[in-house]
Image: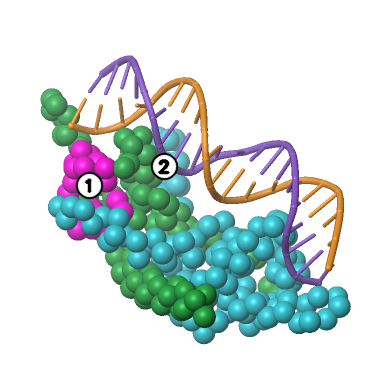
Chain colours: A cyan, B green, C orange, D purple
DNA sequence: CCGCATCCTGGATGATACTG
DNA sequence: CAGTATCATCCAGGATGCGG
């Protein structure tokens, strides 16, 4: 066993996961990858369940990590636009392969569920 | 905007994330990918911080999802070995690219930190 | 040795109201 | 419009002890 280095060996994994995982991050990233630029209110409309507080905090984290850009227009009423940074877009291949793995997995699990049902009936 | 389908569009993403994310899953997967077979107690030794309860529950989830195999040896004292399934190993490329993205990210963040310090000094 | 049952805490998340 | 402030809630995760 490679003692001692579990934590360190996985911190890169964790670092990546911190950014793309969570209840809202994937959805936010998805929308911003699809849309070039989105206003705060547009994001909110796209995710009716999310509260302003959560949306704000998640966006701030992504901004802090350099994944998204926050553009404030000095005007009344206020206007703020969010967009992926170039760096943020480097996540795209990862997200895509995660999505396709996830898709296969869901299909697989579905099959197993129905197999279970058959077993249960027998 | 693609209304209505945010949740569904991201459920594949979430499905994949559910499996590899969390405080312990990445570490467990890492060890099992490195080691072919590991006993419960070996895993525990490899992750001194984890409680038995957490280790058990995380292993059960992974088993339920078909990622790992649980082999019980009928003997006293009990012996249980865990190993990646073939299906579980299909996660390997994903994990690898996550790791390399995370590694770059950590380096990038480090640079930015030290840049911040310089600014603070100025 | 392996793992379940019970109880419990803290941090993440949510509801609501307010503001520049 | 785009947030902040405050308070309430919830549940993943942890501590501990028992049992096959």
Distance CA(mark 2)–CA(mark 1): 34 Å
Q: Which residues are magenta?
A: B27-48
| Label disc, if present, on residue B46 of the rendered structure | 1
Query: Mark 1 belongs to which subunit?
Result: B
Residue B112 visible within the image: no
Which corner quadrant holds the N terminus of chain B? bottom right
**Vertical arrangement, residue B22 with respect to residue A12, above or below:** above
| Pair 2/1: label in front | 1
Badge 2 is on which residue? A116
Snapshot quadrant of residue B44: top left
Residue B30 part of the magenta segment = yes
**Vertical arrangement, residue B27 with respect to residue A12, above or below:** above
Left-right relation of A20 to B92: right
Q: Residues within 10 Å of mark 2 (few under 14, many from 20)?
A: few
SS assignment for the magenta stretch, majority: helix
Q: Residue at coordinates 57% horizontally, 72% vertically from top-left?
A: A63
Q: Nearer the viewer, residue A71 or B52?
A: A71
Q: Residue at coordinates 43% horizontally, 75% vertically from top-left?
A: B114
Query: Mark 2 belongs to which subunit?
Result: A
Task: Where is residue A14? Give x, y as percent.
Answer: 39, 60
**Vertical arrangement, residue A5 with respect to residue D20, above or below:** below
Q: Are marks 2 and 1 on the same chain?
A: no
Do the residues bearing badges 2 and 1 touch, measured as CB atoms within 8 Å? Answer: no
| Label disc, if present, on residue B82 of the rendered structure | none
């Amino acid at each position: 066993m490679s003692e001692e280095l579990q934590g360190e060996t996985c911190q890169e994994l964790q670092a990546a996961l911190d950014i793309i995982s969570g209840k809202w991050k994937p959805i936010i990233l998805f929308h911003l990858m699809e849309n070039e630029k989105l206003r705060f209110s547009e994001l909110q409309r796209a995710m009716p369940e999310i509260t302003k507080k959560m949306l704000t905090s998640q966006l701030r984290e992504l901004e802090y990590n350099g994944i998204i850009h926050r553009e404030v227009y000095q005007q009344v009423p206020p206007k703020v636009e969010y967009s992926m940074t170039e760096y943020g877009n480097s996540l795209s291949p990862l997200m895509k392969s995660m999505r396709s793995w996830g898709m296969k997995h869901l299909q697989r699990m579905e099959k197993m569920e129905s197999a279970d049902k058959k077993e249960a009936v027998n």
